[in-house]
Amino acid sequence: MTTPESTSTPREVTDDEGTTWSCVQAFAGLSDDDAAREAAERAAEGDGKLAVVCTPRGGAQSVRVELPPDWASLPDERLLAAIAAARQER
């Protein structure tokens, strides 16, 4: 498991099929840290979950998952389960 040091640092996990997923919190790429923090807070206001975008290497389609604020420290299995569930919804 690669745990990011900040919301803008991607976290990588590899599934059973050998696909490596790079996940980053949505809005993390905003150039203004205050704007990114405010956007994330607004996104989390409803149910307390944050939008995280996971992009695979090797051809599968990116997915957007809703995860708890501590998603960076989730066990790999839980993150991979969220990715798998999002892929099934498509």
Image: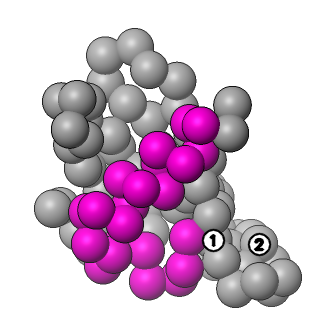
Across and down, in percent, residue 48 comes to 70, 85
- Residue at the image position 38 percent from the left and 61 percent from the top: 79
Which of the 4 image quarters holds residue 58?
A: top left
Going by the numbered disc 2, the residue's amino acid type is Ala
Going by the numbered disc 1, the residue's amino acid type is Leu
Using the numbered discs, state the Cα–Cα distance from disc 2 to disc 1 in whole angstroms: 6 Å
Q: Which residue is mark 1?
A: 50
- Residue at the image position 44 percent from the left and 35 percent from the top: 55
Q: Is residue 24 above or below residue 63?
A: below
Q: Is residue 77 above or below residue 54?
A: below
Across and down, in percent, residue 23 comes to 41, 50
Which numbered disc covers residue 83?
none
Across and down, in percent, residue 19 comes to 25, 30
Q: Which residue is mark 2?
A: 43
- Residue at the image position 36 percent from the left and 53 percent from the top: 80
Q: Is residue 32 above or below residue 38?
A: above
